[in-house]
Amino acid sequence: MAAQKGRDLLLKVDSTGAGVYITVAGLRANTLTFNSEVVDASSQDSTGAWKELLAGAGLKSAQIKGQGIFKNAASDATMRGYFFNGNIVNWQIVIPAFGTVTGPFQIASLDFGGKHDGEVTFDLSLVSAGLLAFA
């Protein structure tokens, strides 16, 4: 796979529930992490005392982190509302030349910051809340 522009890794939200996804305003950086817990099936009979794992038994999850700026009051209010209300909404993560991950996520953290000579920034962390689809 050839190198891709980081700005093409997009985080989108279905803010109306109608299946129409809009890009989250002003993101400067995104990270998508997939996790899979393992289940240890080792016993005294494990060959050579090596750990054995039970295939397909662990929980899967995904986490998205994004950093950026809010471009307008509406996008700021939407993210704050999702966090304070504990909403689980559908999000899309567009990975250039790879595919799109779609599914329910909840905002786990929302941080605001800024320097005296700069803009207000935010850090956003989303955690998967159900089955994710990859297309």
Image (tube, helix red, strand yellow):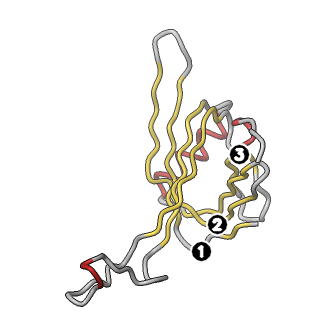
Residue at figure coordinates x 59%, y 32% from the top left: 68
Residue type, label 2: Gly
Classify mark 3: residues with Cα within 10 Å, few (<14), some (14-19) or many (20+). many
* Farthest front residue in view: 48
Give the amino acid at mark 3: Leu
Pinpoint residue 37: horizontal percent, then vertical percent.
41, 70
Residue 82: % across, % down = 54, 53
Q: Please tell me whether mark 3 sits on a helix, a strand or a loop.
A: strand
The residue closer to the viewer here, 3 or 61, is: 3
Q: In this picture, is 7 found above or below 86?
A: above
Residue position marked by numbered label 2 in the rendering: 103
Whole-angstrom CA distance, mark 1 to mark 2, is: 6 Å
Image height of 78 relative to 62, above or below: above
Which residue occupies the extreme left position in the image? 44
Q: Position of residue 100 (x, y in %)?
A: 73, 59
Q: Is there a contact, CB below 8 Å, between mark 1 and mark 2? A: yes
Q: Quadrant of residue 16?
A: bottom right
Label 1 sits on what residue type? Answer: Leu
Q: The C terminus is located in which quarter?
A: bottom right
* Residue position for label 3: 10
> Badge 1, how many Cα within 10 Å: few under 14, some, many 20+?
few
Which numbered dot is residue 31? none
Q: Earlier in the sequence, mark 1 or mark 2?
A: 2
Vertical placement of 15 versus 36: above or below?
above
Tell me the residue at 48%/57% (across/down). 85
Q: Secondary structure at mark 2?
A: strand
Q: Earlier in the sequence, mark 3 or mark 1?
A: 3
Residue 4 to residue 12: above or below: above
The residue to which callout 1 is attached is 131
